[in-house]
Image: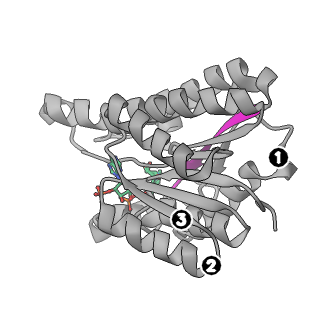
Amino acid sequence: MKLSGCVSLITGGARGIGKEIALTFAREGSDVAITDLNLEGAEKTKQEVERLGRKGIALKVDVSRFDDVTSVIKKVLDEFSKIDILVNNAGITRDQLLIRMREPDWDRVMATNLKGVFNFTRSVAREMIKNRKGRIINIASVVGITGNIGQSNYAASKGGVIIFTKSVSQELASRGITVNTIAPGLIDTEMTREFTETLRESLLKRIPLQRMGHPEDVAKVALFLAGEESSYITGQVIHVDGGMVM
Ligand code: NDP
């Protein structure tokens, strides 16, 4: 098993990509802390982790609230004594053309998608520095590279995650910690099931591999970045998008 004896913390682990990463890591031997706004969903992921023979803990937290994040991380450390792998996955969209975008839509997306990554990374990095070992994996998006009509808030937040990754990876490399980003394209989750059929069809036309991605496609790359095989990779953006952006 690739993550035997490891402890992972996944944000937004109640469903979608975060849940799949939690279960993939558990199958490879990691105990998993699942955090989410949706405690009921996080509990269900925890139960599945335990059915795979690993320890789990489910905690409710809004990633945008610094003090709440700090106390959740303390609870995880009380339970597991260490955190080897952090996956900053929680994210939201509030799509709207710029001239119709309301200030709360901008603020909420930035607070969740970008500040949330800072909040968790800031606290967990302290622990990883003590252990001189760690893996941080941030989930951005291809629109953080290309931009997108109707997603100026989301694209700016994900572009921010990419450049945050590059900065922090340089700060933490000498402490044995790698920091990388995954940029998914169009992945079949509840987030994208809300898209209209017309939007899904038009996006599919832009994917050379001619299908939507599955959460497993992202989880397999997260596993690679969490494990030993990627020990010489840091500060990178790995696209998981069927060739959508080259
Ligand atoms: P989902 O909406 O299916 O799942 C996101 C999870 O994060 C939900 O459980 C949600 O809880 C939780 N969450 C939202 N806001 C917060 C918060 N403030 N604090 C804690 N938890 C929160 O999304 P996906 O699985 O599709 O996406 C996961 C990540 O991948 C996101 O960062 C997304 O931007 C990114 N991504 C997804 C793509 C896709 O095509 N699906 C493409 C590119 C990137 P609740 O349900 O209560 O809101």
Task: For label 2, count other residues whose C-alpha is less than 10 Å away and answer few (under 14), some (14-19) or many (20+).
Answer: some
**Within the magenta stretch, is there residue 77?**
no
Please give the name of the residue rendered at 73% of the width and 35% of the height, measured from the top-left corner: 178
Q: Which residues fall within the magenta stretch?
A: 177-185
Q: CA distance from mark 3 to mark 1?
A: 25 Å
Viewport quadrant of the C terminus: top right
Q: Are marks 2 and 1 in contact (CB under 8 Å)?
A: no
- Residue 72 higher or lower than 42, as above or below: above
Task: For label 3, count other residues whose C-alpha is less than 10 Å away and answer few (under 14), some (14-19) or many (20+).
Answer: many
Point out the residue furthest to the front here.
78
Mark 2 lies within 8 Å of ligand 1 (Cβ measured):
no
Q: Earlier in the sequence, mark 2 or mark 1?
A: 2
Please give the name of the residue rendered at 61% of the width and 26% of the height, measured from the top-left corner: 126
Q: Earlier in the sequence, mark 3 or mark 1?
A: 3
Q: Return the residue at label 3.
A: 56
Task: For label 1, count other residues whose C-alpha is less than 10 Å away and answer few (under 14), some (14-19) or many (20+).
Answer: few
Q: Is residue 245 left or right of residue 19?
A: right
Residue kind at label 1, given as amino acid type: Ser
Q: Quadrant of residue 114?
A: top left
Q: Quadrant for ligand 1? A: bottom left
In the foreground, 95 or 114: 114
Q: Return the residue at label 1.
A: 230
Secondary structure at numbered mark 1:
helix
Q: Is residue 130 left or right of residue 164?
A: right
Please give the name of the residue rendered at 66% of the width and 63% of the height, measured from the top-left corner: 25
Tell me which secondary structure the magenta stretch mostly adopts: strand
Q: Is residue 212 left or right of residue 221?
A: left
Residue kind at label 2, given as amino acid type: Leu
Residue kind at label 3, given as amino acid type: Gly
Q: Return the residue at label 2.
A: 52
